[in-house]
Image: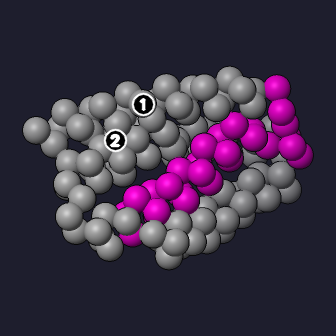
Amino acid sequence: MNWLFIMLGGAIGALSRYGVAQLLSGIRLLSMPVGTITVNLLGCFLLGFFTGFGTAHTHIPRSLILMLTVGFCGAFTTFSTFSAESVNAIQAGNVWQTAVYLAISVGIGFVLFWWGKSLA
């Protein structure tokens, strides 16, 4: 039964990611893809929060936590797009912007996960 919840969360996460990407598609900051940064950082925070919440509240059904973490956050965030955009930026000669993009995505992502987990 868990797979059904994961599938539902994945569908909602994928549609949410597409919506955020479309909403922010025209925004570029230092040649960085704002949509990808936004979904990945928000996803880090949400994954931390949902993980911490599931750990702190053991009465919450495991299937719901799996729906939110594996399903929603797994489909909402996008490591493959992050990697492709990083490689494309380096190949285009935007080494400095790529370094900033990597630092923001990984560094702030780590902090947001920690913060989300702590808040839960």
Q: Residue at x 57, y 26 (%)?
A: 18
- Report crowding for label 1: few under 14, some 14 to 19, many 20 or more residues within 10 A (C-alpha): some
Q: Residue at x 68, y 47 (%)?
A: 37
Tag 2 near tag 1, CB within 8 Å: yes
Quadrant of the image for the N terminus?
Answer: top left
Element on which disc 1 rests: helix
Which amino acid lies under the numbered mark 2 shown in the image of this protein?
Answer: Gly
- Residue 119 counted in the magenta span: no
Q: Which numbered marker is on residue 71? A: 2
Instruction: Give the residue pinned by disc 1.
Output: 12
Residue furthest right in the image: 30
Horizontal placement of 29 versus 4: left or right?
A: right
Horizontal placement of 98 versus 52: left or right?
A: right
Q: Nearer the viewer, residue 118 or 104?
A: 118
Q: Is residue 3 above or below residue 64?
A: above
Q: Is residue 90 above or below residue 28?
A: below
- Residue 39 counted in the magenta span: yes
x, y (%) of residue 44?
53, 57
Region rendered in magenta: 26-52
